Image (cartoon, rainbow, N blue to C red):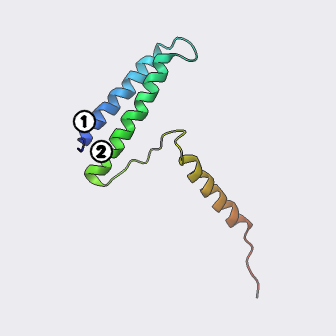
Amino acid sequence: MSIDPRAALSALTTALEEHLIAASARRGEEDPQVEATFLGIIDAFEVYEEALFDAFDEVTPLVIYGEEGADEDEDLSETEDDLDDDLEPIED
């Protein structure tokens, strides 16, 4: 069953607002409410991204921080750039 992208976007917006409220009322460095709302953003974003893709075959330009594979993509692009810098022209 497909989720309406507008409903998923609304849930994501709500998750962001809840995180803002929790962050502004933080009680210490590891406040469980801030952590819970942080994870809520991740969950809501994943639902929105999936709904957007299912409905329109589209994705956002956003990546969840710490998501597996995100660091690998960055490492690959850095490696490719480094390799390009190391290449020397071949002279005939």
What residue is shown at x 45% (from left), y 29% (from top)?
A: 39
Name the mark on residue 7. 1
Q: Quadrant of residue 5?
A: top left
Vertical side of 51 occupied by 20: above or below: above
Tag 2 residue = 51
Vertical side of 43 occupied by 74: above or below: below
Name the mark on residue 58. none
CA neighbours of label 1 inside 10 A, class few (<14), some (14 to 19), many (20+) = few
Looking at the rendering, in which quadrant would you find the C terminus?
bottom right
What residue is shown at x 34% (from left), y 33% (from top)?
A: 12
Q: Are marks 2 and 1 in contact (CB under 8 Å)?
A: yes
CA neighbours of label 2 inside 10 A, class few (<14), some (14 to 19), many (20+) = many
- Dot 1 falls on a residue whose secondary structure is helix
Whole-percent x and y of residue 52? 30, 47
Residue found at the very far front of the displayed protein? 1
The amino acid at mark 2 is Ala
Q: Along the horizontal axis of the image, is 31 left or right of 10?
A: right
Whole-percent x and y of residue 75? 62, 52
What residue is shown at x 49% (from left), y 22% (from top)?
A: 35
> Sequence-wise, which precedes: disc 2 or disc 1?
1
Q: Residue 86 versus residue 64: which sits nearer the camera?
A: 64
Vertical side of 69 occupied by 46: above or below: above
Q: Along the horizontal axis of the image, is 4 left or right of 24?
A: left
The amino acid at mark 1 is Ala
- Dot 2 falls on a residue whose secondary structure is helix
